[in-house]
Amino acid sequence: MDSINRLHLLSEQMELEPAEERRENLARPVCFTPKQREAVFVHPAQLPNGQSIKLLKTLLTSACERDCYYCPFRAGRDFRRATFKPEEFANVFIELNRKGIAEGTFLSSGIAGGGIRTQDQLLDTADILRNKLGFRGYIHLKIMPGAEKAQVERSMQLADRVSINLEAPNTNRLAKLAPHKQFLDELLQPLRWLEEIRKKQPAYKGWNGRWPSTTTQFVVGGADESDLELLTTTAWLNKNVRLKRAYFSAFNPIADTPFENKTATDPLREHRLYQASFLLRDYGFDLEDMPFTDHGFLPLQSDPKLAWAQLNLAEHPVEINRAEKRELLRIPGIGLNGVEIILRLRQTGKIHDLSSLGRIGMNTKRIAPFVLLDGKQMARQLPLFP
């Protein structure tokens, strides 16, 4: 099998691994050459610094010795597998990069020969790209379950971002998804090592003079976990290992896996989890602020910020000309940039009407029910039905 056909097989399922791309962007296949029948799946991605790039997301090998119940690459599943040696992949990627097809790579792998051996293969690939072929662009490197601390450190020296998938929020839930993975020792421990290395070693030892950011991923609905469980773990990671972002992947059944008849998770649940995770990370919300149902789920019919405001601000609106930053952040329709704009506008005088905010792109209809301007509530159309 030639290298592009192999890359096609290794990249075609990577929409299951959300990474830097916005979730509304779908993978789009691009051809290596106009005559090439197979396609390489390159994803539109937005990096943490806001830069947009074409990201090749792929595996080094789709061979895997683990038997995770939901995974298309699980051991024993009958499908066509493919493998790259580190130098082979590095050369193929550099050719794609030179042709402008791929500007960065997200590199993961099935586990073949144990987590330590597989991590060595990933490290060798990144090392060849950086130090033999001179690639200075974006690399997101996956940490394998069972990797050693020295391998985690070396990954941090080569990559712009590193990640390890927790998949489930705790030990009991992981046992329902991946019975031969160890939540604490194989998955959570490397995340702790990442933060320990950041704290104890100077940042110049990292790639490009800084340590990489860290992310993780959860499979939503695969283990019948609640949103409260997922967000409790996310909040802990934000605080204790400085997680840059948690990714949520709504479960979808894969044929010829133990979960092939399990019901797919509503994508709207995934969306609400993202909204709630951003409130926890960036907006000063706590778990206690989340509008969970009695069974620990977020309501699907309303985003969590709006649901909180309807309970807490409808009768006690915020005075927009005097509110502190943390209060402004809790108003629906006002995001992080919007708060900074309001604070700057207030330095030159009072805000007398919401139209000035609407002219700079804020959703004034969303804002109006929850704010006061000089003690006055905004005129607004009340809903016909409660």
Image (cartoon, rainbow, N blue to C red):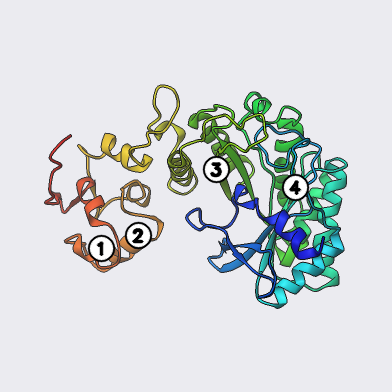
From the image, tell me which residue sits under label 3. Answer: 248
Q: Mark 2–mark 1 contact, CB under 8 Å?
A: yes
| Residue 292 found in image quarter | top left
Which numbered dot is residue 338? 2
Number of residues whose C-alpha sits closer than 10 Å to that of mark 1, classed few (under 14), some (14–19) or many (20 or more):
some
First reached walking from the N terminus: tag 1 or tag 4? 4
From the image, tell me which residue sits under label 1. Answer: 357
Say how many tags the image has. 4
Q: CA distance from mark 2 to mark 1?
A: 8 Å
Position of residue 324 measured from the top left corner of the image (x, y, whole percent): 33, 50
Amino acid at the residue labelled 3: Phe
Q: CA distance from mark 1 to mark 3?
A: 32 Å
From the image, tell me which residue sits under label 4. Answer: 143
Residue 319 falls left or right of residue 335: left
| Residue 96 found in image quarter | bottom right
Number of residues whose C-alpha sits closer than 10 Å to that of mark 3, classed few (under 14), some (14–19) or many (20 or more):
many
